[in-house]
Structures are given as C-alpha cells and as structure tokens.
Image (cartoon, rainbow, N blue to C red):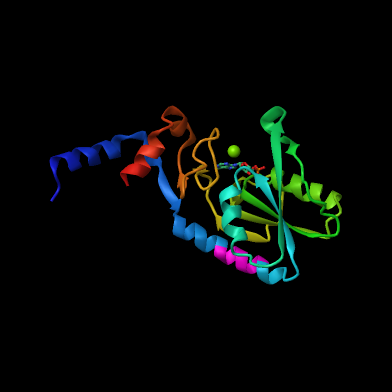
Amino acid sequence: MLLASDASRADRRVSRPADAQRTLLGAGELSAIARRLGGEIRRDYPDGVVLVALLKGSICFLADLVRELPGPCELDFLALSAYGDGRTRVRVVKDLDLEVAGRDVVVVLDIVDTGLTLAYLLRLIALRGARSTVACALLDRQSRRLLPVEIRYVGHVIADEHVVGYGLDLDERYRNLPSLEVADEAELRAEPTAMFERLVRR
Ligand code: IMP
Ligand code: MG
C-alpha cells in the first residue's frame, strides 16, 4: 500500500536535481573488483611488489586491494597537484619515501581519465630506476584519453560521467561514501548535501 506520505516523498524524489545521481558500483561490487585485481597482482608478483598509491582518490581501493595480497608487499604514497593553463601540468606535492630502484612497482590509481597523471607517474617511477612499473586503476574512462597509457589491471571501464565516493571526490567532498555514485557536477555543486540525503533515504 502506498501511503500519502510515501507518494509525496516519491514525487519529491523525481523532481529533485539529485535524481541525476545513481549508484554505479555498490560496496559488494567494489570488493569483488579488489579481490579479482588483488588475485591477479598476487599471481604476477609471487616474490613481492611495491604498491605506489596516488593520493587521495585511491585510498579506499588501496585499502581493499592490499588485503587481497597476503604476500610480500610494501606500500608507498605519492601526491600530485595540477597547475598551469587548463591544469594540464602536474608537480609532486608528496614524494615517495621508499627507494624503488630495482623493484617491481604497481601504481594504484582511482581513475585514469586523460592519462596525463598516469603518464607522469610511470615516467617518474621509471626515472627512479624501478625494475618494472605497471598501473592498476579502479576505473578507466577511455573516452577522454589524451595520452595513450597502458593499464595492466583495470577494475571497471566507465562512460564520460563524473563519479564520486569510495575515495573519489568533487571539491574534496564524498570520499567517504562506501559506494561509487554517478552525479552531475553542476548539480552537486548547486546542492552539495543532496547526495547524502539521497543515500540516507535509500
Ligand atoms: P587524468 O590525469 O586526467 O587521467 O586524471 C586523473 C585524476 O583526475 C584522477 O586521479 C582523479 O583524481 C581525477 N578525476 C578524474 N575523473 C574523476 C571523477 O569522475 N571523479 C573524481 N575524480 C576524478
Ligand atoms: Mg579530485
């Protein structure tokens, strides 16, 4: 039975800008991705690997991924910042602590979009003398690629839509959501708390 209050709530739901939002990957699907990719990395590097995670977007993915790698494994972090015209140039704001010379490195990223960040990371780590460097990305948005980059381990290929949650942000918000949500950037900026309201209502 549909109560009057339910009906009005449903109507509100249809008319709210937040309705452009939808869950792309739920918590269960995200753990399954980490399990699959963790298994592949574990098989490919039985003697150990250095995971270099790009801050901050990769934190949730990294936390799930490392727990699927119960073998020799070290962790390090890098943070970059975009600058310049069109923000197409990047610089290091937090450098590696570990010495990666002679090591096998897997770079862990939230999403590869234009490929500029990944290309920069791969070159930086190669210059540090790593024996091998490959990429592992939770998401691959191939349609926006500007630079050809190889991603050895891909979680999920996505369309040209903005995603937040599970570490990914919009203006530093939404990293704490347990699922990955598709949302219109302009609508999220216009109504920044609508996403939380929708998730609580669910
Ligand atoms: P790229 O250098 O264009 O490949 O951009 C990669 C970086 O942009 C990622 O590491 C993210 O931090 C950010 N990014 C790209 N698309 C999204 C998105 O849909 N949501 C949140 N962050 C994104
Ligand atoms: Mg960001």
Q: Position of residue 164 (x, y in %)?
A: 50, 43
Q: Quadrant of residue 94?
A: top right
Residue situated in front as seen by the camera: 176 or 29: 176
Q: Residue at x 19, y 42 (%)?
A: 6
Tell whether 16 sits left or right of 76.
left
Tell whether 101 sits left or right of 174.
right
Residue situated in front as seen by the camera: 182 or 59: 59
Q: Residue at x 67, y 30 (%)?
A: 86
Q: Residue at x 29, y 39 (%)?
A: 13
Residue situated in front as seen by the camera: 96 or 201: 96
Q: Is residue 36 magenta?
A: yes
Q: Residue at x 72, y 28 (%)?
A: 84
Q: Main secondary structure of the magenta part?
A: helix
Q: Quadrant of residue 43?
A: bottom right
Quadrant holding ligand 2? top right
Q: Quadrant of residue 64?
A: bottom right
- Establish if 45 lies above or below 133: below
The total of numbered circles placed on residues is 0
Q: Which residues are magenta?
A: 35-41
Q: Is residue 88 magenta?
A: no
Q: Position of residue 185 (x, y in %)?
A: 49, 35
Q: Position of residue 142 (x, y in %)?
A: 61, 51
Q: Position of residue 56 (x, y in %)?
A: 62, 42
Tell whether 132 sits left or right of 30.
right
